Image (cartoon, rainbow, N blue to C red):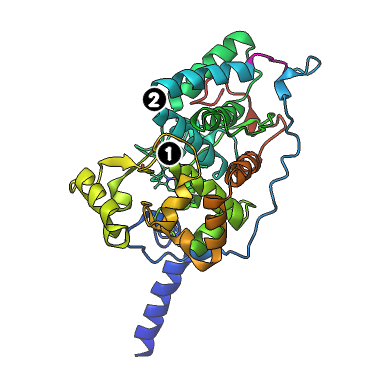
Amino acid sequence: MATSKLAAFVVLAAFLAGPAACEGASICFNGWLRTPRFCPRGSRLNRRQRGASPSGLGLGYGYYNNRRSPSYCPRAEGIVRGAVSEAVAANPGIGAGLIRLFFHDCFVRGCDASVLLTMTNSKNNDTEREGPPNKNSLRGFEVIDTAKRAIEAACPGRVSCADIVAFAARDASYFLSNRRINIRMPGGRYDGRESFANETDQLPGPFSNVTELQASFAAKGLTSDEMVTLSGAHTIGRARCMFFSSRFSEMDPTFAAKLRAQCNGNDNASVNQDDVTPDVLDKQYYRNVIDRKVLFTSDAVLNSTETMRQVRENANRAGAWERKFERAMENMGKIGVKTKADQGTEIRRVCSRVNN
Ligand code: HEM
């Protein structure tokens, strides 16, 4: 009896010990799973464990316009704006993709363009792009590459891919909001040299509850209000049925019936996130939350007591959400930024790979 108790204890201890003892269990994609698995460290996120608010120290507005700086490249921001304008005019969905790309970059290793890498300094090719939240989902890479090529031709080795991602998200927000959202986006980020698929478990998932959402934003130094504000980006773009087909019964019945028909049993089919104004970055999302016309659990839970007040305010007060979104996007762009040239940073020549 004593021996079997000891054996059980050894197995449990090995499981809780982490990756070596229990492959895969320490990386927790619970928010991305319809039926969450028990993860020993999945609970490492705690709402009270707030990271320091991102300072953005070392970043500056008009960073590339300073004649006396070695980073001088006055055409940089204009080139990005041109590339984004063209891409969004051809397909607004790419603009949505660019805004999401920025979020997924900043939440993993800070805004350092690690999300763009396909090959890293440590010769790892299982990069963030391969992580469950990103694979077969992120889009807009070609816009970043187009802008980067033109910028390298104008001023080689000066403008980071991380800044291009940030400027592109700002510009996509501008065009998709019919010029109502104007984010002040500083520059001066350096590019990172590492990227790992398993670190994308820091991204909140569509099955996350309010506590998990708040915790994942707090871990990056962002507030619950910023979480609610930034979720408003789900008023554009598309989402695959696998992330919401389990909750048709919780939605507005007419909305659910329409989605059911669009998905038609195919989990890989995709639908517009906002059925009312699908291509406009506006506050419609909050009306949809109230009306139970949103897709994910992570959207629907914003109607809970803790966050309902912000949802109502964003839905009802003209201009309130737009101003908050501008500030929150700027703040997100300060998360974990690298602003000095050192061993772990560089200005990449090609955004998808490190310089060597
Ligand atoms: C709050 C937690 C969030 C969760 C759980 C979440 C989850 C998701 C999921 C599951 C999708 C659909 C992906 C697919 O079907 O492949 C999606 C799409 C999208 N998300 Fe989020 N997201 C969150 C926050 C954000 C934030 C902060 C932003 C930007 C500020 C954002 C912007 C977008 C956009 C624009 C799309 C559509 C992308 C496209 O059409 O290519 N999301 N999100």
- The amino acid type, in three-letter code, at marker 1 is Ile
**Residue in the picture at 43% in, 68% down:** 14
Q: What x and y, as percent, mark residue 163?
A: 61, 28
Relative to the observer, which residue lies in front, 251 or 142? 251
Q: What x and y, as percent, mark residue 265?
A: 18, 49
Assess mark 1: CB under 8 A from ligand 1?
A: yes
Relative to the observer, which residue lies in front, 119 or 148? 148
Residue 180 drawn above or below residue 81: below
How many C-alpha atoms fall within 10 Å of the one at disc 1: few (<14), some, or many (≥20)? many
Viewed as shown, does residue 22 lie left or right of 212? left
Q: What x and y, as percent, mark residue 339?
A: 71, 33
Residue 73 included in the magenta stretch of the image? yes
Q: CA distance from mark 1 to mark 2?
A: 12 Å
Secondary structure category for the residue under label 2: loop
Whether residue 41 can be seen here: no
Secondary structure category for the residue under label 1: loop
Residue underneath mark 2 = 91
Chain part drawn in magenta: 71-75
Quarter the N terminus occupies:
bottom left
**Residue in the picture at 52% in, 29% down:** 178
Viewed as shown, does residue 283 lie left or right of 226? left
Q: Residue furthest top?
A: 153
